[in-house]
Image (cartoon, rainbow, N blue to C red):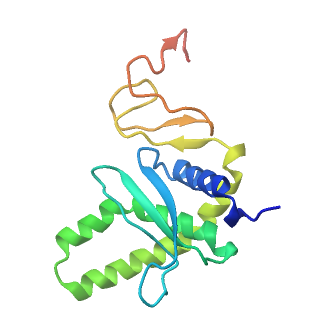
């Protein structure tokens, strides 16, 4: 049996589940294995992103240990969740030393979330997860509320016909 690391479909499937759990469905995410990311080979994974285009290639070193692959994917996708926070820090904090300290604290927080989110991803097939589509509520109104769905369901666009009230129930 091939390992998770050797099965590209399993890796992409896992990345899609993480993307789903983190509410990043409007991003185009790709997983790219590379020989090296940095000169001293200390980085095992990184993500580049274009926020306006919502594209994000995740680069992972080919020699990554199997046990580090899932947490690395979670970690890099968490960076996308934090994109706006990173940009706020860049815009507001001009002093490099303070900005670097804030980045380090954010990075530590992301690291603490890796395992709990990886665990959540593993059980996501058997639970209902909130889908956050900003600007759309349960009835398709533009209010910024969230709506709920079961994993595997297709997201529906915001529209007045998304949910309709019929005799006190919502369909």
Q: Is residue 107 above or below residue 169?
A: below
- Residue 39 % position (x, y): 41, 88
Q: Residue at x 61, y 78 (%)?
A: 63
**For this rendering, which residue is in front, 16 or 112?**
16
Q: Residue at x 49, y 87 (%)?
A: 42
Q: Is residue 98 above or below residue 124?
A: below
> Which quadrant of the rendered structure holds the N terminus?
bottom right
Q: Residue pushed farthest front?
A: 35
- Residue 116 % position (x, y): 62, 65
Q: Is any atom of residue 102 visible in this view? A: yes
Q: Residue pushed farthest top?
A: 167
Numbered disc total: 0
**For this rendering, which residue is in front, 5 or 54?**
5
Q: Residue at x 39, y 82 (%)?
A: 104
Q: Residue at x 49, y 14 (%)?
A: 165
Q: Is residue 122 above or below residue 129?
A: below
Question: In screen coordinates, is 20 left or right of 87?
Answer: right
- Residue 81 % position (x, y): 42, 58
Q: Residue pushed farthest right?
A: 1
Residue 7: quarter of image = bottom right
- Residue 68 % position (x, y): 63, 74
Question: In screen coordinates, is 53 left or right of 4?
Answer: left
Residue 171: quarter of image = top right
Question: In screen coordinates, is 132 left or right of 148?
Answer: left
Q: Is any atom of residue 81 visible in this view? A: no
């Amino acid at each position: 049996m091939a390992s998770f690391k050797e099965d590209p479909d399993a890796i992409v499937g896992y990345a899609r589940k993480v993307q789903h759990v983190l509410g990043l469905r409007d991003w185009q995410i790709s997983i790219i294995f590379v020989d090296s990311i940095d000169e001293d080979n200390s980085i095992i994974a990184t993500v580049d992103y274009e926020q306006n285009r919502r594209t994000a290639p995740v680069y992972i070193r080919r020699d990554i240990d199997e046990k580090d692959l899932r947490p690395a994917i979670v970690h890099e996708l968490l960076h996308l969740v934090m994109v706006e926070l990173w940009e706020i820090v860049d815009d507001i904090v001009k002093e490099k030393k303070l900005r670097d300290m804030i980045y380090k604290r954010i990075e530590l927080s992301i690291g603490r979330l890796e395992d709990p989110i990886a665990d959540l991803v593993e059980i996501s097939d058997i639970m209902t997860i909130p889908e956050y589509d900003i600007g759309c509520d349960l009835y398709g109104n533009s209010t910024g509320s969230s709506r709920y769905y079961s994993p595997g369901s297709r997201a529906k666009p915001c529209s007045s016909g998304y949910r309709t009230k019929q005799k006190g129930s919502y369909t």
